[in-house]
Image (cartoon, helix red, strand yellow):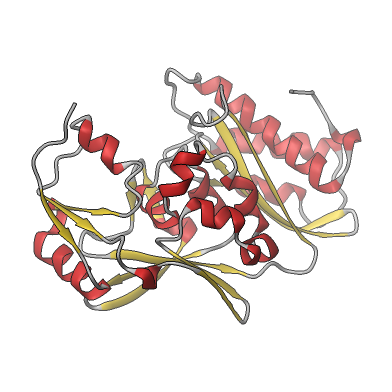
């Protein structure tokens, strides 16, 4: 199929992009990597009157570290995130997760800002942002707003981003001493959408978690920051504690059923992901309740 007719503008500055978005409101769509937008246009799932192309905005690219904050420009491509030494050092969770994002051709064009703004509940990067305690930086004609990632995602393809605002960067706190990442997802084939996944960031002291952020994806309408992780923090984890946390997790989830997986299958995967995360990070194979390849 072919995309419906639309008007096209290539912004030469952030101010120009914001002016165009303010002028056309929800009749405009932003083009960054285009890996979600172009298929939606061609399938007639989206029919904006205007496409605002921001690919020329070099100020929205790149990775910097200032003090205790890692800042990633919204137009930084997945392939650049994958190979960035700064990200590998300060936010290795993103390095691990990017390998699971679609295929190399997609990663060469897709952008981190585009993925976050698209807010696909089966996407890896929104969950990573939540697990890392990241801040989403958005800009409108009235100035910048900083929104905690766990508050930014509102539902399926819904965020706190207003039609006249542009996502310009994501800021990640530099990892604490003893912090470790975990990432895993279950998908039918490499590159497919996940049936369930987990992005986690932990701080470990000896044989116990002092902090544990578990962000599940593809098990709800947005990333789920599991409150049940509290059952695993503050003292050495036992099998009983893990079982209690898994039972509490089950009550937090509201997975959908589709052609990929049933709701019960997704709940099962989520419980297994929690177990796999704890066993891997604490190096405690004795905690394995049931094995899943």
Residue 49 picture location, percent across and down: 9, 48
Q: Height in image: 105 above or below 201?
A: above
Left or right placement of residue 282 versus residue 81 in this view = right
**Measured from the top left, where is residue 65 in percent x and y?**
59, 75
Query: In which quadrant of the rendered image does the N terminus lie?
Result: top left
Image height of 91 relative to 249, above or below: below
Q: Give the position of the C terminus as an image quadrant.
A: top right
In depth, the one of 179 and 252 nearer the eye is 179
Vertical side of 101 occupied by 44: above or below: above
Q: Nearer the viewer, residue 70 or 202?
A: 70
Q: Position of residue 270 (x, y in %)?
A: 62, 32
For image coordinates 57% across by 62% down, the residue present is 133
Describe residue 197's horizontal placement relative to residue 54 as left or right.
Answer: right
Residue 36, image x, y percentages: 33, 41
Q: In this figure, what is the number of numbered marks?
A: 0
Residue 215 in view in this figure: no
Q: Quadrant of residue 143?
A: bottom left
Q: Quadrant of residue 272?
A: top right
- Answer left or right for 12 relative to 64: left
Q: Is residue 226 left or right of residue 38?
A: right
Q: Residue furthest bottom?
A: 67
Q: Name the residue: 53% across, 63% down.
A: 134
Residue 159 showing in the rendered view: yes
Which residue is depicted at the point 14% across and 46% down?
A: 48
């Amino acid at each position: 199929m072919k995309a419906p007719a639309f008007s096209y503008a290539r912004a030469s500055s952030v101010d120009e992009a914001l002016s165009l978005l303010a002028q056309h409101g929800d009749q405009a769509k932003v083009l960054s990597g285009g890996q979600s937008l172009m298929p939606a246009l061609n399938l007639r799932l989206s029919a904006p009157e205007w496409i605002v192309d921001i690919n020329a905005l070099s100020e929205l690219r790149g990775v910097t570290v200032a003090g205790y904050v890692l800042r990633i420009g919204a137009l930084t491509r997945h392939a650049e995130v994958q190979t960035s030494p700064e990200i590998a050092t300060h936010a290795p969770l993103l390095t691990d997760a990017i390998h699971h994002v679609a295929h190399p051709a997609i990663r060469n064009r897709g952008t981190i800002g585009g993925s976050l703004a698209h807010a696909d509940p089966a996407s890896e990067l929104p969950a990573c942002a939540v697990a890392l305690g990241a801040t989403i930086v958005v800009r409108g004609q009235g100035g910048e707003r900083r929104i905690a990632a766990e508050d930014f995602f509102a539902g399926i393809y819904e965020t706190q981003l207003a039609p006249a605002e542009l996502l310009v960067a994501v800021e990640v706190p530099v990892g604490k001493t003893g912090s470790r990442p975990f990432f895993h997802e279950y998908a039918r084939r490499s590159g497919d959408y996940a049936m369930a996944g987990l992005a986690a960031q932990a701080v470990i002291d000896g044989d116990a978690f002092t902090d544990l952020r578990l962000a599940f994806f593809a098990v709800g309408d947005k990333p789920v920051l599991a409150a049940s992780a509290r059952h695993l923090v503050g003292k050495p984890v036992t099998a009983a504690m893990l079982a209690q946390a898994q039972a509490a997790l089950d009550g937090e989830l509201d997975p959908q059923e589709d052609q990929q997986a049933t709701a019960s299958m997704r709940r099962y995967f989520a419980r297994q992901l929690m177990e796999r995360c704890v066993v891997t990070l604490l190096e405690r194979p004795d905690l394995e309740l049931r094995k899943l390849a």
